[in-house]
Amino acid sequence: MQQLQSCTQWGLPQGAIARLGKGGVGRIRYSPDGTQLAVTGPLGIWLYDTYTCSEVALLSTGQVHGTTSIPQSWGGITLVNHNWDDTVSLWDTHSGHRLIKPERHTDIYDVALSLDGTILVTGSSDKTIRFYDSQKGSLLSVAVGHTESITGLAFSHDGKILASGSGDNTIRLWDGRDGKHLSTLRGHEDEIWSLAFSPNGIILATRSTDQTLCLWDVTTGKKVETLATGLDKFGYIVFSVDGTLIASGCSDKTVRIWNADTFTEYLTLTGHRASVWTTAFSPDGRTIASYSSDTSIRFWDLKNGTEKGIITGHAGWLNSIAFSPDGSLLACGSTDNTPHLWDMPTYTVSTPFDNIPDSIYEIRFSPDGSTLAGACIDESIYLWDMNTKSSRAVLQGHTDTIRSLAFAPNSINLVSASDDNTIRIWDIDTTSELTVIQSDTHYVSMIAISPDGGTLASTTNGSIHIWNANTGHLITVLRGHEGNVRTLAFSPDNRLLASGGNDETIMIWDIKYYQHLLTLTVSSSVYSVAFSPNGHILASTGMDGNIRVWDPISGNQRAILNGHFEDAHFLSFSPDGKLLASCGDGIIFLWDFNSIGKIYS
């Protein structure tokens, strides 16, 4: 199938020129002939060639990107994806895309579709299960009985039974057509996380936060076996097509596979670098695919456990982004424990550095571009040499999570802020700690250094502390926000400071006189603000995922950029001001500021 353009350009919102990353993964599923793998996520449904591990299509927003039609290898099988706004997308080769808004059902935790594609069910925090006609979207029935949120759903292969798991520690079986209650299975001691029927519909496998995986005979309602104990909460359960194997991902970075007949462990697959969330058996029973928080989908040979192929780019959470000073690279820190470097001309990604022990909370380039710094959840700061692409040093001294980093203009001094209530200034050449600033009794969530290097701003609870960056002495405290202040940015001319927070406002401050100038009202919490290099534009983003473009002098809103499906939490302008990068929901968008003025004028 001909790919019409690079997948980084598939399904872009207006104003964006590229998308880096593909978003996290909900579930994965093989096509009936095994030639393709469907991967659900915030953008829609990705389809991959299982032989080449390359992208075939993206089914998103009612359109098919990358191919001229939905690939026929699915043979009329309907694919379902639960969207962020509680709509449900259904795709099939006969009728194309259908978007269903389940009537009166919000905060949906899980969805399931009968194998014949006629019945759609949703489970929600409202403790109910709703049955819908998947063709019309009309409500058929409401199943009531659970006393806590519905956390998992699964149809038997013949569609006659629906199983539901809940926070009330029970499994309920319902008639798959009319929602009539059939029976209740009891035995777990905590909420049910995942459910799966065997192909013959007799055995139901369940996984719970009580750390067990159990098998039940649905005809008798009795527990057949506790297949495993000591498991963590995460990892969906799947049966092989012939019903002989059961697999589940684990937080210890493995995929565990059991023999469903003998109840013994068949194989443990190792190779992922983080928790494994979901798995899928190929129709021929020779391969299993697995998705992990390390952003990869891996294919394994079920005969000997060797890795056969890998798909990358599906990050579940991106914490921070930063352009290199020359604009040629965009660095990203995420939950997969390694910095990612995106080449701007080609949009290709590399991971040249070794993994570190935990997630990278914030990432920063030194002004001269020679050093990349990453704040890690393990209370350390990791330094990488950008010339040799090797580890340079580890700075240790903080005793709690490090929230923010900022380089001084000299590229030697690095400032860090932490939940241990301190701000620390480091010399990265000697790796020594120069100054420790104690911040009252509250943790420091954000810091910023003025362009001239003389002033340091930090946020503590709802206030902004202004410090002399050379002496560490407190100059003044700016108050006005009514909630936690999440973000700070100095203007390039050293005159203004922008702050945003949970009170849904952005405040502009005069730094020379330490006076409040403007308050910009936003409809959701503000997570990030950034000035353009010439200072003429202030960009902001936050919980609603929208990026707002402001005139920082007049306070007028000039544009709203829509693209992120969930919250966006970090912004970075390229050094020439032509691009704005935004990250959230496992996706980075690059926005073209040359065209945005024309689009939104």
Image (spheres, rainbow, N blue to C red):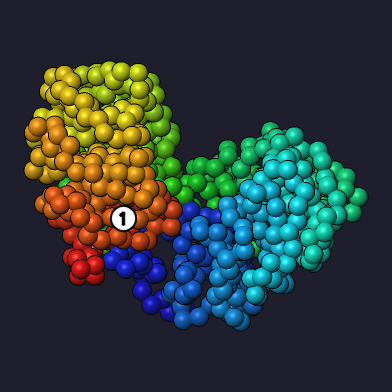
- The residue at the point 31 percent across, 27 percent down is 460
Q: Name the residue under label 1.
A: 547
Q: Which residue is drawn at 35% across and 40% down?
A: 503
Does residue 186 appear left or right of residue 354 in this picture? Answer: right
Residue at the spot 17% in from the left edge and 54% down from the top edge: 551
Amino acid found under the numbered disc labelled 1: Ile
Local crowd size for mark 1, using a 10 Å CA cut-off: few (<14), some (14–19), many (≥20): many
Question: At 49% from the left edge and 42% from the top edge, which residue is drawn?
Answer: 273
Q: Position of residue 569 (x, y in %)?
A: 35, 46
In the shown orientation, is residue 460 left or right of residue 110?
left
Above or below, 3 relative to 537 = below
- Viewer can see residue 274: yes
State left or right for residue 377 relative to residue 435: right
Q: Can residue 197 be seen in this view?
A: no
Above/below status of 596 relative to 500: below
Side (left or right) of 206 relative to 363: right
Residue 149 location in percent, x, y? Answer: 66, 45
Quarter of the rendering occupied by the C terminus: bottom left
Closer to the camera in the image, 381 or 44: 44
User: Where on the picture, by quarter, is residue 505?
Assistant: top left
Q: Is mark 1 on a helix, strand or loop?
A: strand
Q: Percent from the top left, x then y, of residue 69?
A: 50, 80
Q: Nearer the viewer, residue 376 or 423?
A: 423
The percent position of residue 208, horizontal first and vertical second, equals 70, 40
Q: Name the image quarter holding residue 102.
A: bottom right
Q: How many marks?
A: 1
Q: In this view, does 551 lie above or below 378?
A: below
